[in-house]
Amino acid sequence: MPNRLATASSPYLLQHKDNPVDWWEWSDEAFAAARQRGVPIFLSVGYAACHWCHVMAHESFEDERVAAYLNRHFVSIKVDREERPDVDAVYMEATQAMTGQGGWPMTCMLTPDASPFYCGTYFPPVDRPGMPSFGRLLESVVDAWTNRRAEIEAAGQDVVRQLTERGATTPLTGSGITVEMLDAAAARLSDEHDDLKGGFGGAPKFPPSMTLEFLLRHAARSGDKRSEEMVAITCERMARGGMYDQLGGGFARYSVDDAWVVPHFEKMLYDNALLARVYAHWWRLSGDPLAKRVALETCEWMLADLLTDQGGFASSLDADSEGHEGKFYVWTPDELGPEAAAAFHVTPGGTFEHGSSVLQLLHDPEDWTGYDAERRRLLEIRNARVWPGRDDKVVAAWNGLAIAALADTGALFGRPDLVRAAARCAALLVDLHLVDGRLRRVSKDGVIGDPVGVLEDYGDVAEGLLALHQVTGDERWLAIAGELLDTAIAHFSDGDGGFFDTADDAQSLFTRPKDPTDGATPGGFSTLVNALLTSAALTGRADHRDAASTAIGLVAPLVERFPRFAGWSAAAAEALVAGPLEIAVVGAPDLAELARRTTSPGAVVVTGGDSPLLADRPPGAAYVCQGFVCDAPTSDPAALAARIGVRVRHDDVTLRP
């Protein structure tokens, strides 16, 4: 019969509702049960699209013998890391401190007061070299708990003490960002860039979205051709390899090799929202047709495969179908036919398992019409296969990223359908996720979940609403974004100019997470400072600009020395040192189109509606301000292009006489 997870809102937890393990959700009641029984906590953290989470579930959590042992000796708690990033962050820090590495599934043993005393990741069903079986691990923990409980409890308390002290003694110490620091960050990235295959470092390679945004802004502000070159190489290699879905659009989570050939097949909303915006911004700088195609295809994939009935976007598509990773996406030459096999570089030897291959498009086809017809044919065949599972929960932060991507891409390429989708998603977040002025992190099927919003939710949703306001002119989005930012400052500030990842009134854990770095998504810290700067540019609010400036200054050493892990903060810093530009266009469509193509870091552009930047300005002209100073209005496209740094390309009709 189903366990306690049968009533969970998380699709990941629901995947485990029929396990024989007597799972609990993370709750005070679970810890009370452990205290009452005098047993340790077994904490398992994962997410719906995690391949190895599924493997461990099948091997161990569906095993009646293993489940009986767990139920007899532990209180078992299952956590969706996407729903509870606060819990994940605290115990991931413990896992990394104990083992030197981390990942999912995350396996932690806790005392009933939530102190971790043993941490790891995946454990197999049988002993392997250097890796004990999950059953052996459980037996060892039970033996230690039974015979050396006081020692175990003391060890857990010592772990908590060390992690708490480490957090308290490593404050951010930067005192300001400089142009020289940003130049040094770009130079460091140049040294680390793979000029042959794109990306940074070796396998596995993850899409460096935030780093690419920084390099685009750095190239635009400084004229640094090397930064632009790194973006071009990496974006092209990613888009032509197997990590990009050549049939359906959209990117997989990462490449297992260093050449973007074979992906880890899960497809995440956050990756695709971030990358769609990167490719749109790359086109804005370069005019490369590949950039435009990939930006639009990625947005179209989000609408086709992740859009929910309520207008939000689901979190992910699974890596597996029919119990096999990648089965939905791979092909053999016989399945494709000779012409398609040649076009997509599929050979009898294969690039994946059992002679199958992931599709690549290493060169543009000579006949796009024929290619599009073949692509539609193959897509129809693939759509008849068994689809990967979809995690239908709507995460506020990631939907904020999607709103920004859809609004930017729709405005740049004249796609009002994308802007409408962004507005519908924004309405869902505001009408459902915003409860009594505070964000809730997740919903599913139009029902709000219990987890409260963390810092990234406030920063990303505000960022999305600010992008949508610039495209639509709707003052509602600007006003709500400002309120979210004010709430974040009130409840997440650390008192020294930085920010915690959880609110001051959130559920207490043994440490309060405060991580200024970016990971797979922009960190809460960097999302907030970017949104604060944009808000200040749109409204003139000095308090938002001052809060962003102080926070960026604190992470300046991190930006300079480790830009790969602070790309979005570095992008915010580029906006700070550049101005940013404030551009208002009233009643001049040709100038409005031109204004949206500015690459000046952090520039805000409004062209209609109720924006404060448009107030009391006569029509027929563009108005440009920067650094509290405004230029004379202009109706000359060439003059506006020169002022806002828009390049004139051979296909540019706006600037032709």
Image (cartoon, rainbow, N blue to C red):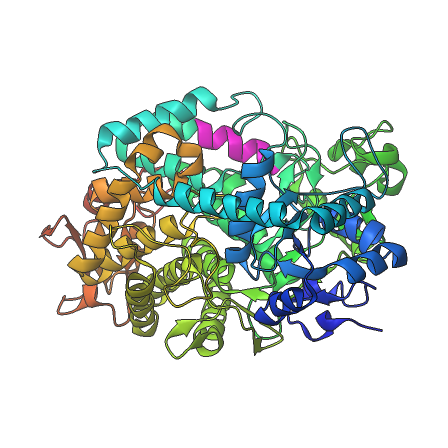
Q: Is residue 453 above or below residue 594?
A: below
Q: Is residue 354 above or below residue 279?
A: above
Residue 356 percent coordinates (x, y): 84, 36
The residue lying at 26 percent from left, 53 percent from top is 533
Question: In which quadrant will I find the C terminus?
Answer: top left
Residue 298 percent coordinates (x, y): 57, 51
Residue 141 percent coordinates (x, y): 73, 47
Is residue 277 or residue 46 the one in the foreground?
46
Q: Is residue 603 left or right of residue 24?
A: left
Is residue 289 or residue 57 the one in the foreground?
57
Residue 479 percent coordinates (x, y): 29, 71
In the rendered image, is residue 657 in sight? Answer: no
Q: Is residue 378 left or right of residue 419?
A: right
Q: Is residue 619 left or right of residue 115?
A: left
As for residue 415 lying within the magenta part, the answer is no
Is residue 486 or residue 136 the one in the foreground?
136
Question: In which quadrant will I find the N terminus?
Answer: bottom right
Query: Where are the magenta residues, as a range?
Result: 230-239
Q: Is residue 94 above or below residue 17?
A: above
In the rendered image, is residue 524 in sight? Answer: yes
The residue lying at 34 percent from left, 60 percent from top is 492
As for residue 232 lying within the magenta part, the answer is yes
What is the total number of numbered labels drawn onto the structure image? 0
Dominant secondary structure, magenta: helix
